Image: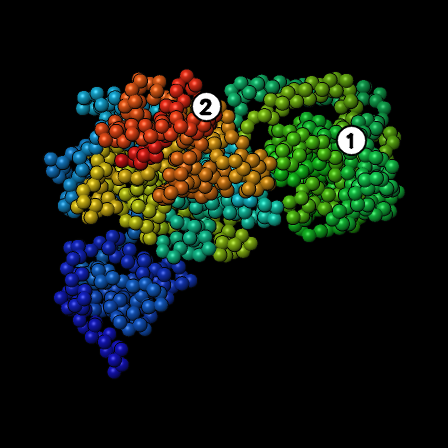
Amino acid sequence: MDFKYFGYFVLALLLSGCKYNLPEELEIAYTDLPEKIDFNYHVKPILSDRCYACHGPDENTRKGGLRLDIEESAFQILQSGNRAFVKGNPGDSECIQRILSDDPELQMPPPESNLSLTKREKALLIKWVEQGAQWKNHWAFLKPMKQAVPSRINEDWPYQNEIDGFVQAKLITKKFVPSPETEKEKLIRRVTMDLTGLPPTIGEIDAFLKDPSIDAYEKVVDRLLKTDAHAERLALDWMDLARYADSHGLHADGARLMWPWRDWVIKAFKDNMPYDQFVTWQLAGDLFPNPTREQKLATAFNRNHPMTAEGGAIEEEFRLNYVFDRTETVSTAFMGLTVACARCHDHKFDPISQKDYFQMSAFFNNVKELGMTGDDGNYGPMLPLPNKSTEAKLNDLQNEITEKEKELVLTKNELAQLEEYIKTLPDSFIETGKLNYYPLDKLSKSNKGHIADQNKDATTKEAPKVVEGIKGNAFLFNGEYDELYLHNIPNFEWMDSFSGSIWIQTSKRDSAKTQTIMGTSGDKNNFWRGWDFYLDGSNRLNARLIHSLPHNYIHVRSKDSIKTNEWNHVAFTYTGSSKAKDLNLFINGEEADSEIVFDNLYKSIKTIRSGDHSAYHAPVRVAKSYRGFTGENGIFLGKIDEILLFNRGLSPIEIKRLASLQNETNTPTVDKKYWIQQSDAVQNLEKELRTLRADWLTTMEPVMEVMVMEEMPTKRKAYLYDRGNYDQPTQEVEANTLSILPEFSDDLPKNRLGLSKWLFSKEHPLTARVTVNRYWQLLFGKGLVDTPTDFGVQGSLPSHPELLDWLAISFMDSDWDVRALLKKMVMSHTYRQSSKVSEELWQNDPENIYLARSNTYRLPAELIRDNALAASGLLVPTVGGKSVKPYQPADLWIEKTSFSHELMRYKETKGDSLYRRSLYTFVRRTQPHPAMIAFDAPSREVCTISRENTNTPLQALVLLNDKQFVEASRILAERIQKEAGDTLDKQITHAFRLATSRRPKKEELQLLIEFYDQQKKRFQKNPSEATKLLSVGEKIVDNSLDMTKTAALTMVTNTLLNHDEAYTKR
């Protein structure tokens, strides 16, 4: 017999008996186990950590045909003929035998995995099998169950509401006792900082201390929940979750304008908008029937992701990255799942397949957006946000325009029916409105290159070849540097009528390439603004008028391609309406059968410079576009001849005549359309209409816009990508939700609106749990699930699962009332407990898992700065508005990049805006505010649910030396001299209360007075140091106060702002 297998056999015999036949080293561990083994809480974490790498959801790494993440596989007969687990029989359970084996060839986990099980974990698995190996699905994937509130455990224990019932039921099992309620000064500071992010005022503290009523605390809570500051506090965390920033991130990290969405978030919290509505508007507000502006604005949530402006970027790669960002943000924020792990392969631990991931991402794949943008500015889809007076003016002008357009149509129709009048009309006159004619017959050298046809307004740097043309000669463009500039052509606006006529000859090109015929449109750094006339990769004719791609422009395209390798006459006409229907294409004298690609132009098409976006009259560029970052540059390869440009719309007869090379007035047919257009009545109406449209544009042009979501009319195909690579699509997929979660109902639309309704179904096991856990984290420092971004099998188990489910169901039953949820939490005794901890409690529960006390932790970065501003009186409480740039060290931004013109240098805000709440501080992703990141504020590049909480010497240096804190210390020193009377102890006591919300102890006050005396002596000896200290910051020094005393008090107040109670929650 093989002795290796003999030992294996003996072990199986031992295990086939009762528990007392356990290996000796496991017996002690066995006796300490819980009476009942729960699969989710005791067994699954072991399997997930030690077994799923080889026996989990990912079929690419699975071994032995065994899956331990699903029940069927765990108990079925394996290829070896054995079973991993046999219910009630550890001895016949292959898995148990292998975890107990010492043989490296049999042992599981194998030694080379560097994973192992503790004695307790082995004993848990054995006892679980003995008890029948009851299997459960992962707790977070099961619908929350309504929980009975535990009855009050001990009448002597403080008890406020149901939360205390659940917490105290757990405490009794651990033989812990809840802590008493904290002191009133600490309580009002705690709840005020938690709910508003600001300290309580002295008046609010004193009023609370003097209020003997039983509901004194509740009155404070109710007041705080209705404040603007409360809405701002909730908005701060939402900015982290929504990865809000004022810059694009990635390459150039240029400026974007998204703060109106932040204002919407603040207002929604102030109005206590139901959470399901709050989220649904952000995910799919644009998909409601007749959506309001606010519903559309809310969808900016899904446009907050970083965007690249790198010239070498691959458009589709980055566009898909934005789709994936939305998928992962929604999954993290609302379901607490790490779905990003399934982008390249099936999830290693959670039952989320790669197909699940890409089906989920299909919900976000139908937005007309760019993968590569410009360095600065917003890119569509966008939502204009006019104020009320501007909107009223726009509406009035639009009404006038509509009436004038009706009058114009009526006048043209009336003239067309005057047959006797028409018979008297002469031939049309092609010269009317002609701007210039370029026969392209010859080139001449000039001091700056070459000119065409002796026309100084037709220039080229590199001379194209002169070859035989359709009439005389033509220019042959066959290189990257061949191009022709036509100067002195008007910088057309969209209310201008204009036309172009040109002869071209080209061959079929690579299907990915476009060929510019002529135009003024720019590149990504000036939003492609202008107009262009070009051939696409299929040699179809295209014309566009562009304010900004991909959302504010009109675009028409011929359905047929031009003939290759022969001369074609192509032309376009446009009649100044901003509508695609009035942009017409012609091929060889006939109006082309065309389709409207896009029809949404409402801002200027006049060309601008890259960089500062200042006005710039670009010449018309022939045979090459201004697009220098697209990889193909729109280069035309072939011959061009006979260019004509007009400042009016040509009639079809005129186009036909140009196509037949008849540039004279003779034509066999009366051009009725031409003469009607040239009549005095029509011309006068056209002028009036142009004036109205110009007024409308002047009013609309400065209106700010925000990037939002907008569905494409035709659904874009979605795919599963091999290893997540953009260029390796495999199977096509349809929008769908994760298969492990409740099925997506056929009654729901397969779009973002349907997705949101699915998320907020009461059958969904995650949405409510994840949300209440996040708000618990806001108030208690960490969630009931300590991994708020991972409710999967690798995440932490809930410390109080019954409480979590009770809160989740209560939240849903309250119609997703966030304010009621927060009130319930802060009204509990669990929240109000003292943070003082006994030695025994510290030893037995150092992480405060069982909530026998309140947690102590450092405040977020923004609250630390806001506390200093509020204590000093500097804080400007204005709500909403654009982001501001408070003090920071000079020239940090110039070290980052010179690509962004707008963000090349940091320009500090002036005046009151320096002292706005930190919520409004400008967030630049690649260069966040240094004082904020010192205290762990995120860069907002990804969805952040829980911030890091570090403790470094740099933080103390910020509080001591940062300009904002030094100035706040000085203003606080001035404030206490004005408000607290003449005695030093009263002034320092007042400063202490402003900074920490409590009165100093006698010994604390004495130490601060002694420190003041030391500093006063120092400044008396060195008055220049006092002057230097007091000069920090923009606020003017109050010279009516004694300079030496103010400087000494500044050192005291600076010390107080460094005191841990000024930046620590207790």
Closer to us: 932 or 249: 932
Q: Tag count in the figure?
A: 2
> Disc 2 versus disc 1: distance between alpha carbons?
53 Å
Specify few, some or many for label 2: CA neighbours under 10 Å numbering under 14, 14-19, or 20 or more: some
In the structure shown, which secondary structural element does the residue marked by tag 2 occupy? loop
Task: Please provide percent x and percent y for residue 278.
Answer: 39, 33
Task: Using residue 512 as the reference point, say whether residue 199 is left or right of it.
Answer: left
Specify whether residue 290 is in view: no
The residue under the point 34% across, 36% down is 859
- For the question of whether residue 899 can be seen, the reply is yes
The residue type indicated by label 2 comes to: Lys
Percent of width and height locating residue 660: 84, 38
Between 157 and 619, which is closer to the camera in this rendering?
Answer: 157
Horizontally, residue 908 falls left or right of residue 633, namely left
- Quadrant, the N terminus: bottom left
Q: Quadrant of the C terminus?
A: top left
Residue found 17% across the figure and 54% down from its top: 34
Viewer-proximal residue among 185 and 264: 185
Q: Earlier in the sequence, mark 2 or mark 1?
A: 1
The amino acid beneath tag 1 is Asn
Mark seen at residue 1055: none
In-image side of 905 versus 346 (left or right): right
Residue nearer the viewer, 327 or 993: 993
- Residue 920, given in percent of the width and then of the height, sits at 45, 30
Question: Residue 713's image quarter?
Answer: top right
Q: Which residue is mark 2?
A: 1035
Q: What label sits on residue 488 in the rendered view?
A: 1
What x and y, as percent, mark residue 328? 43, 46
Residue ID at (74%, 48%): 480
Q: Residue furthest bottom?
A: 1
Are dots 2 and 1 in contact, CB under 8 Å? Answer: no
Image point (21%, 66%), residue name: 90
